[in-house]
Amino acid sequence: MAAKKRGFGQIRRLPSKRYQAGYTGPDAALHYAPSTFDAREDAEAWLADERRLIAAGTWAPPKARAKAKAEGPMTFGTYAESWLRRRDLKPRTRAHYRRLLDDFILPRFEDVPFAHITPVAVADWHADLGTATGPTYRAHAYSLLRTISLTAVSEDVIDASPCRVRGAGNSKRVKKIEPATLAELEALTKAMPERLRAMVMLAAWCAMRFGELAELRRKDVDLKNGIIRVRRAVVRADGEVIVGTPKSEAGVRDVAIPPHLVPMLKTHIGEHAQWGRDGLLFPNPDGENMASSSLAWHFNKARVAAKRPDLRFHDLRHTGAVLAAQTGATLAELMARLGHSTPAAAMRYQHAAKGRDAEIAALLSKIAEAK
């Protein structure tokens, strides 16, 4: 029997005497009701409901809705796994997110329907984290949950984010970082094995990251023009050594070498670097990229010898930022040298050097005396 013409959709009577209803959806495809109807009025009611969903902007294909209903509401764990799988992340970042999910978020929310997670539940979870981990991981875990929730809102999985704890994504630095003085840097370098001294100096004077230094090769160092070309970095994630681009797009940069380091670098390359253009500047004894644990074994002893047992290798990057700032470099110039993409990231490396305030005060007096 031919379908009866109508304003929205169509209904036709089948040879079985039952009624079939269908319509063309917003996706320009033809959709039918999941089942047929005993009475035309029931088919009419189904079409009216579908039209209301379209008008409200909450429509989805009937088959998809039926499948979702059969499977039950989507749990946070199901969505979080999908979210992580679809992200284009650096290996270290992916491993970090994986740990945050496994250790802090999924134990509480994995089997909970995402739409049932309330702001109160998130606030309780965040409060409980305060007794289970430090402030940094607590802030990172909350930030990840918030990011996943905001994506879920944009994809119409949930109506609103349940993450509303003010300031929970920020963490105060527990340890105040005190950059090394020039005397401490000299003592630290002398206490290191000869093959690692240049690595310490580049970490400080060029403010380079460990992963960038561990992947430096002969072809990246231009001693004639005094430039190090940072194009790659090495990371270890889940026991795998991965060579890729630096931490951020801004990390791909050319770093000018302070002239006083050039003779030392020339000697290091001649005596300790691997042969060939692709030879590593700081190889492990086994010839592979240096592991941070290999460096730490020597660095931990050297920092004690320099009377700075609190100093971490990454803190040398802070030293480099202070030294560069003391030259009068602008924030933009510091961002370029350190490979930061945002001013906020660069500002985390700004420190007041000891005695610098007194020097500033003296210079202010000179300005006044010049009048």
Image: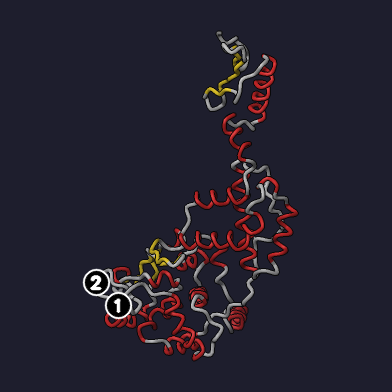
**CB under 8 Å between callouts 2 and 1?**
no
* Residue 345 placement: quadrant: bottom right
Q: Is residue 44 left or right of residue 81?
A: right
User: In the rendering, at what x and y percent does residue 310 appear?
Assistant: 56, 83
The residue at the point 65 percent across, 69 percent down is: 133
Of residues 371 and 203, which is closer to you in this image? 203
- The residue at which mark 2 appears reads as 276
User: In the rendering, at what x and y percent does residue 159 appear?
Assistant: 67, 42
Q: Is residue 90 visible?
A: yes
Of residues 147 and 112, which is closer to you in this image? 112
User: In the rendering, at what x and y percent does residue 1 appear?
Assistant: 56, 8
Q: Is residue 369 visible?
A: no
- The residue at which mark 1 appears reads as 273
Q: Is residue 2 left or right of residue 225?
A: right
Q: Does residue 2 sit above or below 84 in this rendering?
A: above
Which label was assigned to residue 118? none
- Name the amino acid, label 2: Gly
